[in-house]
Every structure is written in structure tokens, then in C-alpha cells.
Amino acid sequence: MISTKAYSLFIVSLALAFTSSLSITAPVFTVKITNNLALGSKPIIISCISSKLDTSSQVLFRGEPFGLMFDTNQSDKWTCDIFSSSGAKKTSFVLFDLDRDKSRCKPDGLCLWQINPDGFYLYVASIQKYQKQ
């Protein structure tokens, strides 16, 4: 006959084994980008695309966020173009790549970006701070 303590330990071990066999990557990710450019700066325009989806262009004033939510079974890489408010292209960057970001975003699938005057910053969950990319 198994003791209550041994049975409890078995149940906890079984639960841990089951959860560790599951992917720690959320199948649905939410990416939020915030315009943190200098006070008085003109708004920027951001447009993002994946292999299957395309966002419309979004105008972001200072302090404003832009977000998108997607299922990684359909879109596992997003690239964004940033334009000045006059329409001149400034830069492009990979907003999300499942292989790169699954361990950098928060466990619940939230990825936080900031557009700062000196570059793009991603909140890296493992170190709990924004890191320049």
C-alpha cells in the first residue's frame, strides 16, 4: 500500500512531467510597440507584414502604442517598416520571429517593444528589462 506522502509526491511528479512536456511557447502572441521618441517629435507611421497577413499603416504619436495579436501556427514572423510622417521610409526591422523571440517574450506571449530616439528596444523577460536590439 502506498503512503499518502508517496502518493502526493507521485501526483506532483506526474503533473510536472506533463507540464514540462508541453511547449512553454504561447501559441498566440501579442506584440505591443510604443512610440517613445522625444517630446515634440513628429508622429511615425508603422506598417507590419507576415507571410499571410498585413496590417494597415498606423500613425503613432509619441506615447501611443500599436499592437497586434496572432496565432503562431499561421504567422511566425513579422517584419515592420517605419516611415516618417512625410512618408519617407526610415527603416525596417523584424518585429517578431518565433525562433528568436519565444524565449525572450513573456511566458504568456506578450512581447513589448519601444521605439526610442536611439533605436528599438525589446523587453526581455528573462532579465526583466528593455534591451536595445
Image (spheres, rainbow, N blue to C red):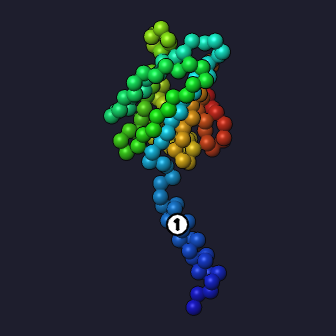
Is residue 4 found left or right of 48 in the rendered image? right
Residue 23 percent location from the top left of the image:
47, 54
Q: Is residue 32 left or right of 116 when viewed as pictured?
A: left
Task: Give percent across and percent down for residue 64.
Answer: 57, 25
Could you tell me which secondary element the residue under label 1 belongs to?
A: helix
Which sits in the foreground, 32 or 14? Answer: 32
Most foreground residue, 41 or 52: 41
User: Looking at the rendering, in which quadrant would you find the N terminus?
Assistant: bottom right
**Residue at the image point whose x is 51% and y is 52% from the top:** 24
Q: Report the amino acid beneath label 1.
A: Ala
Q: Is residue 110 above or below residue 120?
A: below
Q: Is residue 1 visible?
A: yes
In the image shown, does 59 or 33 lie closer to the viewer? 59
Image spot of residue 102 (x, y percent): 50, 43
Q: Which image quadrant: the C terminus?
A: top right
Residue 53 picture location, percent across and down: 35, 32
Q: Is residue 7 above or below residue 52?
A: below
Residue 133: tell me if it is visible.
no
Does residue 34 sit above or below 42 in this rendering? below
Q: Quadrant of residue 43?
A: top right
Query: At x 62% / y 81%, what residue is drawn?
Result: 6
